[in-house]
Image (cartoon, rainbow, N blue to C red):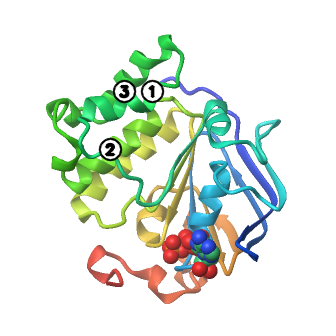
Amino acid sequence: MTVTTAPALHVEGLRVARGTRTVLHDVRLDIPAGEVTALLGPNGAGKSTLVLALGGILRPTGGRILLGERELTGRRPEKVRAAGVAVVPEGRRLLPSLTVRDNLHAAVYSLGREARRPGVEYALQLFPELRQRWHTPARALSGGQQQMVVLAQALASRPSVLVVDELSLGLAPVVVKRLTPVLADVAAAGTAVLLIEQFAHVALALATTAHILEGGRIRFSGTAQELKDNPDKLSAAYLLRTNAEDSPS
Ligand SMILES: Nc1ncnc2c1ncn2[C@@H]1O[C@H](COP(=O)(O)OP(=O)(O)OP(=O)(O)O)[C@@H](O)[C@H]1O
């Protein structure tokens, strides 16, 4: 596989408010090309807020977001996306009455004419199962297939950076096992992948570097191996759950 050197995403001193309350304080993260970085943390830690800020949906009140040398802070979502940062927010929905084909075509519509077809082809190489469901309306797909289309939509733009919020939420372990190698392959091909998970085992199995966000602050940054070797460093007990049956209902 050809490894390209995509720029890394750098987050420095990021501060983000929801309403009048600051929920992210001085967040610093590097998301390097060519690997998966995990961001773990309990409910309400601010993970989804960070994802929305990275995607340009929430405007930071302080700090910077850089793609390589390029300033993305305060840019609108379409500009962020055009710069090469694809964000899959938690619970992203497809257009239910549109087919897989039309959902994918809608996602690549804003790309240049030449990039559309190769983008869709690339996404279908990663998820060949979608060819069999090509003319199926999204509402008739299983949860796992819907998540595949959502990831395919993000990957069809061949992003330099892919941010995925709660990949495994609501999915059966067998489906998660199907999806996670795709993220590993995408990273191995040179993309910077940030995987946000409430359940540590999924993310730590893929990640090189891991961060723990708690109360809107980064409490740990180190190797994923360090967290696997020292589970006590995962400060919230439920981060240690090892399968979906343990998920809080
Ligand atoms: N729309 C909103 N308006 C005001 N406060 C919000 C809003 N959305 C989230 N918050 C608050 O911001 C903080 C961070 O929430 P966020 O959703 O980013 O956390 P999270 O780590 O993604 O948790 P979860 O896994 O539960 O989504 C929480 O205290 C939450 O109550």
227 versus 187 height, above or below: below
179, 148: nearer the viewer: 148
Give the Cα separation between the discs numbered 1 and 3.
Answer: 5 Å
Residue drawn at (35%, 32%) of the image: 104
Instruction: Determine which of the numbered discs, if any, sits on residue 95 in the image.
Output: 2
Residue 105 placement: quadrant: top left
Where is mark 3, residue-wise?
A: 105
Mark 1 or 2 closer to N-term?
2
The disc label shown at residue 108, or none = 1
Three-letter amino acid code at the position of disc 1: Val
Q: The disc labelled 3 sits on which kind of residue?
A: His
Q: Are marks 1 and 3 in contact (CB under 8 Å)?
A: yes
Residue 137 point in image, percent of width and height: 19, 40
Q: Is residue 151 left or right of residue 72?
A: left
| Mark 1 Cα-neighbour bin, 10 Å: few <14, some 14–19, many ≥20 | many
Indicate the quadrant containing the C terminus: top left, top right, bottom left or bottom right: bottom left
Quarter of the image containing the N terminus? top left
Q: Quadrant of residue 225?
A: bottom right
SS label for mark 2: loop
Mark closer to the chain start, 3 or 2: 2
Real-space CA distance between mark 1 and mark 2, rounded to the nearest whole angstrom: 14 Å
In percent of the image, x 56 and y 81: which residue is there? 234
